[in-house]
Amino acid sequence: MKYLFLFSVAILFYSCSGENSEPVVWESIEQSLQTQLITVEDGGTIELPEGNFMFTKSLAMDGKSNILIKGRGMDKTQLSFKNQTEGAQGLLISHGANIVLEDFSIEDAKGDNLKVSEVKGITFRRVRSVWADGPKTENGAYALYPVLCKNVLIDECIAMGSSDAGIYVGQSDSVIIRNSKAYWNVAGIESENSRWVEIYGNEAYENAGGILIFDLPGLTQYGHTTKVYNNNVHDNNHENFAAKGNIVASIPPGTGFMILATHNLELTGNQIIDNKTIGTGIISYELTVALNEGEQEQEGAIGGVQTVNNSYKADSLYNPYPYQIYIHDNVFSNSHWFPSMSNEIGKLFIMKSFMNPPDIVFDGIADPNRINRELCVKEGDDINLINLDAAHDFQNLLIDRYQFNCDGVKVNAR
């Protein structure tokens, strides 16, 4: 009877696990798909079949207009670059207009998974872009990466595993990022040097930093006019696994929002929950440079990552200080008593705000050309707001929830 029982258990285990143990069957459509990307006529559609497809080289489409590239669904059409030996990007689309990408997954490119450059009118809809083995410094920088584009829509997408930013929009105009999820990235969602941007209805969680709005020196344009609302930004407490010297390497793990050197920004209606170090940080580029002093970029970085520019003052048109920032009517909550100790900022908060990590932090570095920064914070009476006075080695750090109370700054995002 004992052997019959063991045999029965073995059969039961095999039958229960067998449904999920079928090996993934990989196919190759590399040559045929690249041919379609080259030969498709303007106004055409490229249909990606259902299945799992492995690629060894980058795919590229250049100079096309009014093109739809459509799969059968995020869970049904999978493009993997796990065995990539040539090129950096998985899929690169450039110099086109009115391109729609929807209903497929793209994984494990050597550099950036899906890059779109200099396209007027680009839509990502229900695209899943990930590094399947999870967070690693060796992963590519960006999962979804439109740069130098106009009229960008990212809707119902998923980004995971990026060593820089999962959903990233750089130097672009008229941008909407909505209804998407970003997790296990260094930065979940990032808008960098972009203008007329709306970010709403997204969930960013388990990143080092949830949502970033950055303006950096030495690029083709400067950013402004961003509205960030009705997002759920919670539990962004993952370790920061960015390569040393990269701009996002300075993000303290446990950061909900980070606002860097931009202006005309409104942050409202967001759930900012259980980000253990900082709910929302407002900082200048000066502090970023100071935090990265002595760091060198790791060799072998692939993709368009931005490193810390110690010569930023040579860009005479760049303003390294944030201004016209309006933060109001958000929900701040943090059940953690202690910030992350893996970053100097977290160690500072242990000393200066013991057992009460800040909801909002301003670095306090003065702008020599602007008396009134127009920083406005209208939140509840129970928030913890800290002015770091970083320019004077934090000597006059001020904890006062009302220090930036005002009537607000009107932001027109579009």
Image: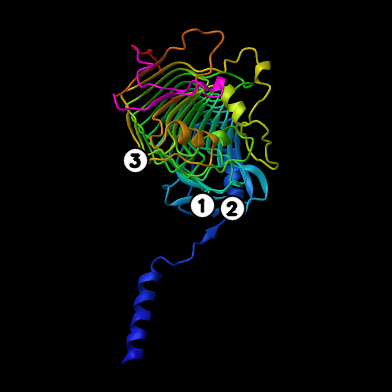
The residue carrying mark 2 is 82
Mark 2 Cα shell of 10 Å, populated few (<14), some (14-19), many (≥20): some
From the viewer's perspective, is residue 132 above or below residue 210? below
Residue in the picture at 43% in, 12% down? 374
Residue position for label 1: 132
Query: Of the residues under marks 2 and 1, which one precedes in the sequence?
Result: 2
Q: Are marks 3 and 1 in contact (CB under 8 Å)?
A: no
Mark 3, residue position = 335
Q: Is residue 401 magenta?
A: yes
Query: Which percent across, then down, holds residue 229?
Result: 36, 27
* Amino acid of disc 3: Ser
Which residue corresponds to the image point at 35% horizontal and 71% vertical from the top-left? 16
Magenta region includes residue 131: no
Q: Nearer the viewer, residue 329 or 21?
A: 329
76 lies above or below 228: below
Look at discs 3 and 2 and give the one toward the viewer: 3
Query: In this picture, which residue range is highlighted in magenta?
Result: 381-406
Q: Residue type at mark 2? A: Lys
On the image, the x and y values in percent for residue 208 come to 49, 40
Residue found 57% across the figure and 55% down from its top: 28
* SS type, badge 1: loop
Name the dominant secondary structure of the magenta segment: loop
Q: Quadrant of residue 58?
A: top right
Q: Mark 3 or mark 2: name the one nearer the start of the chain.
A: 2
Contact between marks 2 and 1 (CB within 8 A): the answer is yes
Q: Secondary structure at mark 2?
A: loop
Name the foreground residue: 87 vs 286.
286
